[in-house]
Amino acid sequence: MFTRQQTRALKAGSLAIGGGAPVSVQTMANVNPHDADALLAQSLRCAELGCDLIRFTVPDVEAAKTLGIVRRKMALPVVADIHFDYRCALAAIEAGTDALRLNPGNIGTRDRVQAVARAAKAAKTPIRIGVNLGSLEKDLSEAVYGGRTSVAAALCESAMRHVKLLEDEDFFDIAISVKASNVADTLAAYRLLAEKTDCPLHLGVTEAGTFIPGTVRSSVALGILLSEGIGDTIRVSLTAEPEKEVRVGAEILRSLALRKPGPSVTSCPTCGRTRANVFKVAAEVEDALEKLKLDKYPHVAVMGCVVNGPGEAKGADVALCGGDGEFMLFVKGKAVGKVPESEAAGKVVEYVVSAQ
C-alpha cells in the first residue's frame, strides 16, 4: 500500500475528499446542459459503473436551475463547472450543487470572487480551482512560451494565486487541479504542487485524446502520481463517452489496490481459428458484471477456440469456449452445455447471480 500525502478533508455532498478518504473517480457529462432527462440518464449510467462525482457545465443561470432539478433526483454528487460569469456560480450554489469548479481569476473583479466565496462558505460548498495550460493568465502564458519558466511552474503559480484569492476571503474548502496535455508536464506540475499545498489534488491529463491514446497517457500519468501518494480524486479525460472515462478511472484505482477488485474476466485476443465474436461477448460479460456491484467477483474466462479454452475453463469459476457461432459453457471446470453466442453473456450472469 502507498503512503498517501496528507491533505485537507472536504465533503462534496456525501462524498469525502482528501483527509485520507478513498480516491474518487470523476467524469463530466457531455449532453445538453439544459436537458434534465439526458443529464439524469447519463449520470445514472456513470454512477452504475462506479462514478463518485459528476461535473455539469453551467454556461448560464438556466443551466444552473437544470442542475438543481437533476441533483434532487439522484444521490450522485454534482460539480458545477463555471467560467467567466460569477452569477452562474451563485445560481449553482442556490440550486444545490455539491461543489464548484472554477478559476477565480476569470470570473471578474475581486468583489465577484468575494461574493462567490461567501456564498460557497455559507452553503458549505467546496471549490476546485481548475488550472489548464490553455487558460493561464497572460503573464504566465507569455513566460512559458517565451522560455522564461516551465509549464509546471506556471501551472502551480496560477493555482496558488487563485488559492490566495479565496483564502483572503477566509475560504479554505479548496481542491486544486493543474492539468497539462502530456505526461511529463502533468507529473512535474503535480509533484511541484504537492510540495506547496495541503489542498486535495484532483488528477488528470487534460485533452488526453481519443480512447486508446487518452487511456494510455492518463493511466501512465495518474498511475505514477498515485503510486507516489499524490492525488485525492481523478478524471480520465477522453474524447469518448463519460462511461468509458469512469471504467478506465476505476480500473486505474483497482490496479493500484486503491479500490476494491472488480470483475475478473480473462479473454483471448482471438486468431484465425475463432468462429464466435469473442470481442463482443467478452465486453458484454464485463459490462454486465460491473453493474452487479458484488462484494466478490468470480473469475470468468471468455476464450475463442478449443486450443486454450479448456485449460482456462479449468482455472475459472465460469468459462465460455467459442465454437462456430456458439460457446461451450463451463462451470468450475466442467462442461455444462452449449449456448448460442447471443445468449452467452446472459448465461454467465445467471450463474454468477445464482452463486452469490
Image (cartoon, grey):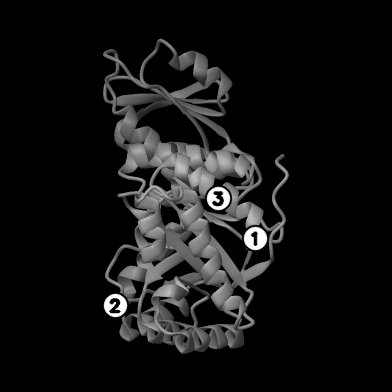
For the residue carrying disc 1, how many other residues have a C-alpha within 10 Å: few (<14), some (14-19), or many (20+)?
some
Give the residue at x 52% y 57%: 156
Q: Amino acid at mark 3?
A: Tyr
> Of residues 158 and 6, which is closer to you in this image?
158
Q: Is residue 252 above or below residue 75?
A: above
Which mark, by number, is residue 190?
3
Pointer 2 or 3: first along the chain: 2
Q: Amino acid at mark 1?
A: Thr
Give the residue at x 33% y 31%: 279
Residue 82: quarter of image: bottom left
Query: Which residue is denoted by mark 1 in the rendering?
Result: 197
> Of residues 278 and 181, which is closer to you in this image?
181
> Of residues 69 and 15, which is closer to you in this image?
15
Pointer 1 or 3: first along the chain: 3
* Distance Cα–Cα, label 2 vs label 3: 34 Å
Badge 2 element: loop
Badge 1 element: loop
Residue 86: quarter of image: bottom left
Name the spot of residue 329 as percent of width and height, x first.
44, 26
Query: Which residue is denoted by mark 2 in the rendering?
Result: 34
Name the spot of residue 165 as percent of width and height, x first.
54, 76
> Of residues 101 and 11, which is closer to you in this image?
101
Pointer 2 or 1: first along the chain: 2
